Image (cartoon, rainbow, N blue to C red):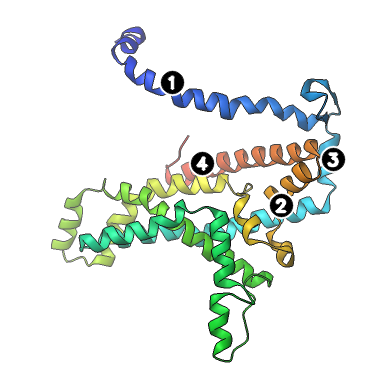
Amino acid sequence: MSNNAYFRRYWQLYALLALPMAYFIIFKYGPMYGIQIAFKDFNFFQGIMGSEWIGFEAFKEVFAMRDFYLTLRNTLLLNFFDLLVSFPAPLILAIMLYEMKTLWFKKLSQTILYIPHFISWVIIGGIVYQVFGTESGMINNVITSIGFDAIPFLTDKNDWLITYLLVGVWQSAGWGTIIYLAALTGINKELFEAAGIDGAGRLKRIWHITLPGLKPTIVVLLIINLGHMISIGFERPYVIGNLAVREYADVLSTFVYRIGLQSGQYTLATVVGLFQAVVGLVFVLGANYASKKLTDEGIM
């Protein structure tokens, strides 16, 4: 079948593709026009085209800042610890839900686990301060009422890090299970039945059937997560963080907000954003290449 004949036969599929393509062109590729701000002494009143070219001077200025390296370190560390703690959580939850036999309890558990994903980080921040606050937090009120000292969950940097990671798991793990549950439905049920007849217990079936069946999904999600190692959401560290734990909570996204919107240094903010994008691309390509070499799985 020729390309023209194929297009005429399946033109509805191409029509359906038009809206997502338009979205990416307008909101993803269109803003790339602003990348040139990183190479200009941007003046808000003169606009992008009227601003003076300065080459890589802004890059030199950013790379000479101590705060840039501090926020870069924090971004990498928080994302690395998040990967260790948050990445396995939805996989474990999905397997547990899949193994449940009581249908009503399974559906109830799924609903309860999904709800945090739909809560704004601003609201989650309020909940965190109500639960973990040193002076008036619910947990510390209980601890002090029985004679123990309050735990500085939000003011000690090490305790804050643990709180940050656990809150992230609570917010994201339930929603992440959807992908794994969808992948689990694609595993041939006859494999589990045959393994059961051969005497394999539940743990052995999970290890030898479930996990190998989820391997392509795990690899793809791992590559995507590695691509985000250099970038981090603004809301979570900004809402949960404070000046007492700035040594850990100050990340590249809050750094861009501080120098871009608060200080009006748009050129420097664009430099940091461009740096994140380029390094993120390198992470994705590197992780994809490594996964193909080691496991024959990849996304590109």
Q: Is mark 3 in CB contact (under 8 Å) with mark 2?
A: no
Q: CA distance from mark 2 to mark 4?
A: 23 Å
Position above or below: 169 against 253:
below
Label 3: which residue? 60
Q: Residue at x 52, y 59 (%)?
A: 168
Can you tell which quarter of the image residue 239 is in?
bottom right
116 or 1, which is in the foreground?
116
Q: CA distance from mark 4 to mark 1?
A: 28 Å
Label 4: which residue? 288
* Amino acid of disc 3: Lys
Q: Is mark 1 in CB contact (under 8 Å) with mark 3?
A: no
Q: Earlier in the sequence, mark 1 or mark 3?
A: 1
Across and down, in percent, residue 286 comes to 57, 42
Q: Residue at x 85, y 42 (%)?
A: 61
Label 2: which residue? 72
Q: If the image is split into quadrants, where does the N terminus sit?
A: top left
Can you tell which quarter of the image residue 106 is in?
bottom left
Q: Earlier in the sequence, mark 4 or mark 1?
A: 1
Label 2 crowd (10 A; few <14 / some 14-19 / many >=20) = some
Residue at the extreme left: 197
* Amino acid of disc 1: Ala
Q: Nearer the viewer, mark 4 or mark 1?
A: 1
109 or 87, which is in the foreground?
109
Residue 207 appears in the rendering: no
Residue 88 appears in the rendering: yes
Across and down, in percent, residue 17 comes to 41, 23
Across and down, in percent, residue 63 comes to 81, 45
Q: Is mark 1 in CB contact (under 8 Å) with mark 2?
A: no
Q: Judging from the image, what secondary structure is the residue with disc 4 in?
A: helix
Q: Judging from the image, what secondary structure is the residue with disc 3 in?
A: helix
